[in-house]
Amino acid sequence: MKVLMLNGSPHKNGCTNAALEVIASELKAQGVESEIVWLGNGPVRGCIGCCGCRRNGKDRCVFGDDGVADIAEKFKEADGYIFGAPVHYASPNGATVSALDRIFYSAGKYMQFKPAAAIVSARRAGTTASYDVLNKYIGINNMLMVPATYWNMVHGNTPEEVMQDKEGVSVMRAIGSNMAWMLKLLASAKGTDLEKPVIIPKEKTNFIR
């Protein structure tokens, strides 16, 4: 069992990473492997709705110059996910949103029925709005949202300050513990009728006729 964690912050070892490391430590304590993948601090293309990833037969984004397509390949193989982002202007930073748009569009079908959680990091405000944005990726893709004991956020201007946010740290630990529990439950259902639910086909309609 492996959990892939996306660090969408432009700061590799900043506050978002500190929160993800707490989750990783709890997962390790419960026998679950994890990997933190850093999105980087270079430009990240947004999805342009070209559908090239679906036409190329590989479910791979046609843009290969910013590392997102390679990260999406890792997402296809993972058993669980954590999406981590800093708050910029009361929203997840733009690079994370651009990356997740492309990852979910090109590789979303490989992520269905797997557990996931979103976490956000801020100095002070904008956390609940950012948390809501990230949760929409999980909710639209038949994924299982990992519960916690409060909103999934940490506060601080440095990694050291994040670690002083005792409530935030406890929430990160709860995410790791609950993720491990859900993965073990899902593993116990493999090969049985409970492995996956009955898939209801999506009916696509437009509001304008």
Image: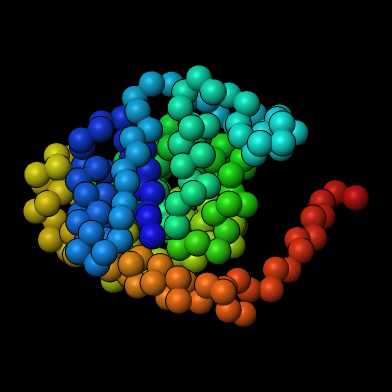
Question: Can the viewer see residue 127 in this picture?
Answer: no
Residue under the image location 37 percent in, 54 percent down: 3
Occupied quadrant, residue 169? bottom left
- Marks counted in the figure total 0
Left or right side of 208 for 58: left
In the rendered image, the vertical position of residue 119 relative to residue 183, given as above or below: above
Could you say where residue 82 lies in the image, as x and y percent from the top left?
38, 52
Where's residue 15, x and y in %?
21, 42
- Residue appearing at x 20%, y 35% in the figure: 13
Pick whichever, 168 or 88, lies toward us.
Answer: 168
User: Residue farthest to the front?
Assistant: 191
The residue that appears at 38% across and 49% down in the rendered structure is: 4
Extreme residue toward the bottom, this view: 193
Q: Report whether 145 appears left or right of 10.
A: right
What colour-coding does the image apply?
Answer: rainbow
99 or 55, nearer to the observer: 55
Q: Is residue 23 visible?
A: yes
Q: Position of residue 146 (x, y in %)?
A: 40, 66
Q: Is residue 97 above or below residue 150?
A: above
Q: Position of residue 19 (x, y in %)?
A: 23, 50
Instruction: Check the image and report above or below for 13 versus 27.
Output: above
In the rendered image, which quarter contains the N terminus?
bottom left
Q: Residue furthest right?
A: 209
Q: Judge by depth and name the residue closer to the eye, 15 or 27.
A: 27
Q: Residue at x 35, y 39 (%)?
A: 37
5 on left or right of 97: left
- Asked which quadrant contains residue 93, the reply is top left
- Relative depth, front residue between 149 and 196: 196
| Quadrant housing residue 48 | top right
